[in-house]
Image (spheres, rainbow, N blue to C red):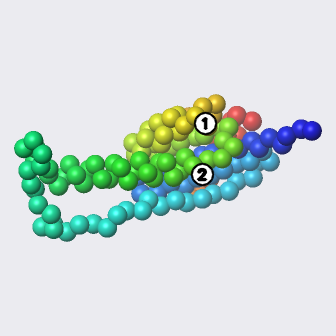
Amino acid sequence: MKKSVNIMQYGIFIDHKKAIIVSIDGKNNAATEEIKMTESPARFSGESTDKTGMFRHTLDRQSRKQNKDQNEFRKFCKEIATRLKFANQIFIFGPAEGKYDLYREIEGRKSMSNVYVEIGSSDKMTKAEVIRTVQKHFSAFA
């Protein structure tokens, strides 16, 4: 008995606020999914203070906010990577540096060790432009 092999090609447009995932199956049918990054509630200035922490190290708001934003984006990349099932080829593109964070997340997963991943740059795009870009990219491989 032969196993059915699902061939999936994914194109991911990623920004720091949202991601659009375009999946193309073996019959060249495209499906899209949009994921927005959830942000934790903002804290008001004056709600917390700059205090000296352990070992006389000052904990400033700016570095705490930057660390929090970085951790939230890392969770966002993990959420995107879990949605890529049966992937054979992945094309990641977008205007920001977030595409490299997503690339590192995908490369770090054992289940995706044999997936071909390519990175490209682009400007901001609409959903229709993203779909056309992904179809054009993968039609070159066919």
The residue at the point 63 percent across, 34 percent down is 115
Q: Nearer the viewer, residue 117 or 59?
A: 59
Q: Is residue 6 visible?
A: yes
Q: Nearer the viewer, residue 16 or 56?
A: 56
Is the residue 61 above or below the residue 113 in the image? below
Q: Position of residue 27 (x, y in %)?
A: 80, 48
Q: Is residue 123 visible?
A: no
Left or right: 51, with 83 as reference point: left
Left or right: 71, with 91 as reference point: left
Q: Image quarter for residue 1?
A: top right
Q: Nearer the viewer, residue 8 or 128?
A: 8
Dot 1 crowding, Cα within 10 Å, few <14, some 14–19, many 20+: some
Q: Image quarter for residue 127?
A: bottom right
Is the residue 2 above or below the residue 25 in the image? above
Q: Secondary structure at mark 1?
A: helix
The amino acid type found where label 1 is placed reads Met
Q: Position of residue 67 (x, y in %)?
A: 28, 48
Dot 2 crowding, Cα within 10 Å, few <14, some 14–19, many 20+: few
Q: Estimate the spatial distance between the alpha carbons at disc 1 and disc 2, rounded to whole Å.
A: 12 Å
Q: Secondary structure at mark 2?
A: loop
The residue at the point 66 percent across, 50 percent down is 23
List the residue tagged with mark 2. Answer: 83
Q: Nearer the viewer, residue 31 or 130?
A: 31
- Work out which residue is located at the far front of the displayed protein and give it: 54
Q: Which mark is residue 7?
A: none
Q: Position of residue 45 (x, y in %)?
A: 15, 66
The residue at the point 75 percent across, 36 percent down is 142
Q: Earlier in the sequence, mark 1 or mark 2?
A: 2
List the residue tagged with mark 1. Answer: 112
The amino acid type found where label 2 is placed reads Arg
